[in-house]
Amino acid sequence: MSRFRNGYRVFAVIAAFVGLLSVGPASAQQQPVLVIASFGGEFQDQQRKAFFDPFTKATGIKVVDVAGAAVPKVRAMVQTGNVEWDVFQTSAHDYPEYADGLTEPIDYSKIDKAVLAQMLPHTVQKFGLATDYVSQVIAWNTKSFPGNNHPQSWKDVWDVKRFPGPRMLTAGTYSIEPIEPALMAAGVPKGKIYPVDLDKAYAMLTAIRPSVVRWTTSASAIPEALASGEAVIGFASSARIESLKESGAPVDYTWNQAVISIGYWMIPKGAKHKDLALKFLEFQARAEQQAALGRFNVAVVNRHAMDLLTEKQRTLLASAPQNLAREFEFDPAAWSRPGPSGKSIYDENVARWIAWSAQQ
Amino acid sequence: MERAAVAPSRSSVPRSVRAWLLLLPTLLLLLPCYVGPLLQLLGTSVGGDHGPTAAFYLQALTDRPSLLILWRTIVLSVEVTVLAVLIGYPLAYMIARAPERSQHLLLLLVAIPLWTSSLVRSFVWIVLLGREGVLNQLALSTGLLKMPVQMLYGRPAVLIGLVHIMIPHVVFPLVSVMRRISPRRSEVAKSLGAGPMSAFWLIFFPQSLSGLASGAVLVFVLCCGFFVTPALLGGLRDQTYVMLIQQQVDRQWALAAAMSVVLLAVTLVFVALLGRFLRVDDDAGSTRLPKPGRLIGAACAFLGRFESLGARRPARPARPARWPVAIAGWGAILFLLVPILLLFPLSLTNSPYLRFPPPGLSLRWYANFFSRSDWTSAAVISFQVGGAVTLLATAVGTCAAVALSRIESRWSRMLYGFLISPMIVPTLIIAVAFYFQFAAFHLIGSLPGLVLAHSVIALPVVVVVVTGGLKRASLGPERAALSLGAGPLRAFFATTFVAVRPSVLTGALFAFLVSFDDVVIALFLAGINSTLPKRMWDSVQLEIDPTVAAVSAMLILLSIAVVVAWELIRLRLHGGEEAGSLVSGP
């Protein structure tokens, strides 16, 4: 008899799992939660400290932050109607792609005019409000290149005789391609980079290919490789390299020919909590919040935030005037213009990258 | 079995119909959550704006880069299969020939890596093979090398990583077949004058072919669809076809669908070819080989005779030299275990990034895991989903296995093939198919969606394990119970179910681990409800800190604990009988 009961008990347990399942997602939806997607890693930890946690403290709105913001994710969400995110971060590079039907226009009537007035030029856009400047810099391992004996320009990065050792660069499908660096290495002056000459760029990529151990789409791969010595020269975010350097890792970087662009928050089309999202956009643009991010060496977009930082902190920001003069300003509009085939240069480059990467 | 009604049953439903009814839950799971998505995938691949079109297939099959990558994927899979067989065969031989007690221990050692997440195992190689990694550092400090060797992000790393993952998949089917081979035949051959080599190639090897075939097919299929390892350890030239499909999913969905169908077709053709070529009589004792197998038979005979031709010495019964097998076997076990164990010291580093040797020891990254809600909530979700999958897949799979054992054999054979087919379909293709099907029902990012998807890939394991158990169980007691007046349910639970219970529990554990280990499906379906493997994947992609090493170490401990505890319980409960052994594998 007891064995007989045992059998039925199995079915009772099975019935229970239905209950177990419905508990998880349902309970999460009772109180409004702002879902914010960013790029993950230490950078997102910093955003959490500078933006997300203070936002929850100030407004009582709970924030769930997730990693992995990227065009394919957002496109899939919008196309399938499963919009999980309310706000996501993007690079300037992907801005045109998102602005083309994937995001909501920002309703600036709901954002404090005083805050908007403090924003730096180009940081208030129809579909996105800026959050930071991102600078991809030439970085290296200081054990391989001690002192001043390090690459100073993209020409040097391409010079494998003077600066031997494995390189790690971004992939052509990553949001910041190696295309502009390749053109600078070819000697194209800053003002002539756009419209990009893909033939010339890919010829340069072919030339450096044997020395590149990895073309990555991962934001952490290059800083990690430089710190561990897996690669000795790389193309990585200044903030990530700076914080590794401060933690004692053998890495350094130069502002020369760094590719600087603006990072934005955007709201995906059909987001569930648009009003909360706008509240967050305004909050993170305030001088105090921006300054909090600036203390992590991330360049601020609110000019009053600069005043809240120390002199030393200001020199480490990508947007500091003396640094800006040495950097190259990325132009997202140039990538969304049609190329020779009629498709955008952005799409042409993706197709070209896939074909090029498969070559022997 | 068709003469079921030995005694008048109290149920008005005839037995054969009842068996079919037991298949109902399976069909309810597989039709909407497996067949449906795959059909939709097929539909999408030919769906143009104005009716059916072959344009996407044309595009997939004429695009040079993608064909090149498809070809390289096949080559890579063949290479891995060959290497895994070469390393796995001696290991399996050593295990099968070992005394009973050590056999169990050895199988346990092979099972530990099998139970360790493939993501963890790929991650380990990044730490081991790097220029400043463990291997290079050891070689440099002992003076073996002057300059570090570039191993990571290229073919060597991909091969090492994949072979490491695949070896257990070769060993388990081989051991189970080899154990059935009677050593007496070889003894007889030797007493008739065959040398140990001849005895091996003429008698033993041909009989082990069926195990070799199933292992090789499994490895090949898994490799064709493998995503994690090549993506983490490979360079540009090691891109695989599934990586290309993943890139296309959100750009050109129809093209991605067509490419998925192409890959599926290629996989099936290879499975059919390999299966045909290596098919040998299921009965291990038989030496009658069907046509293609005769080739192998001839090759074996040649190898067998080669020894006597070459040696030209009076043949005498000799003990086979055991040390080459032992060296190869133990070498393989070290290869399987050492990398996994090395993760423990590495995870105890106090450095903000992984390096070897760790500059100092601390539990800081373990503390980080437990203090971060994004990590702990991912772990909770993984356990929730795993638990639900275990219940669902085990219940459905057990019903199906019981049904299969009671219906006409031609049907049951076909259905069995269908039920275990999710094993053959590359996981990424299942994930892609689910993705668009589930999106329509707003199941993306929901736990039920993930549970259903994982249940589909966990079902085959349960069916295979429970079917094995049922084959060993006698139907006698159940018939007796029926004839004594018990109802059909009661008769089943009181007799047959008790006999197969160890198998059901083993199946349940397998189901849990299938769910707990999955990265690919979670990547597509988990949404903001990140599972632990997905969180780890994000970490490897986006972060620098060694938290992922700490998590990996904990997962390895967990799998070791589960495997060992399970074996101990099983031994205590069933006194070492075969049924339900975790390490005998599916």
Image: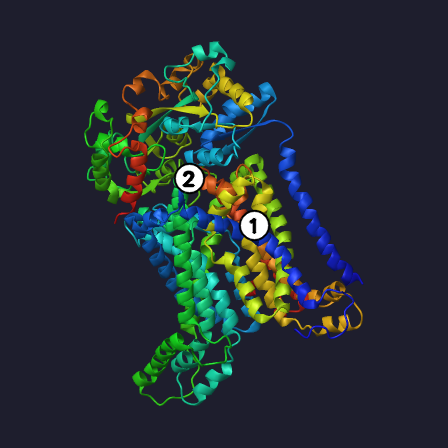
Q: Chain of mark 1?
A: B
Vertical side of B486 occupied by B552: above or below: above
Type of colouring: rainbow
Q: Which mark is residue A79?
A: none
Residue at mark 1: B32
Query: Of label 1 and label 2, which has the lower sequence position?
Result: 1
Q: Chain of mark 2?
A: B
Q: Quadrant of residue B220?
A: bottom left
Percent of width and height locating residue B576: 63, 69
Question: Which is in the foreground here, disc 1 or disc 2?
Answer: 1
Give neighbour class at mark 2: few <14, some 14-19, many 20+ (Cα, 10 Å): some
Percent of width and height locating residue A16: 70, 47
Percent of width and height locating residue B456: 55, 53
Q: What amino acid does circle 1 point to?
A: Pro
Which residue is more in the foreground, B20 or B176? B20
Percent of width and height locating residue B241: 37, 50
Specify the farthest residue to the front. B50
Which residue is more in the foreground, B487 or B533? B487
Residue at 40% in and 57% down: B265
Residue at mark 2: B250
Q: Quadrant of residue B203?
A: bottom left
Q: Quadrant of the N terminus of chain B?
A: bottom right
Vertical side of B344 occupied by A107: above or below: above
**Image side of residue B569 versus residue B334, left or right:** right
Residue at 45% in and 25% down: A266
Which residue is more in the foreground, B369 or B504? B504
Per the model, the C-alpha gap separating discs 1 and 2 is 23 Å
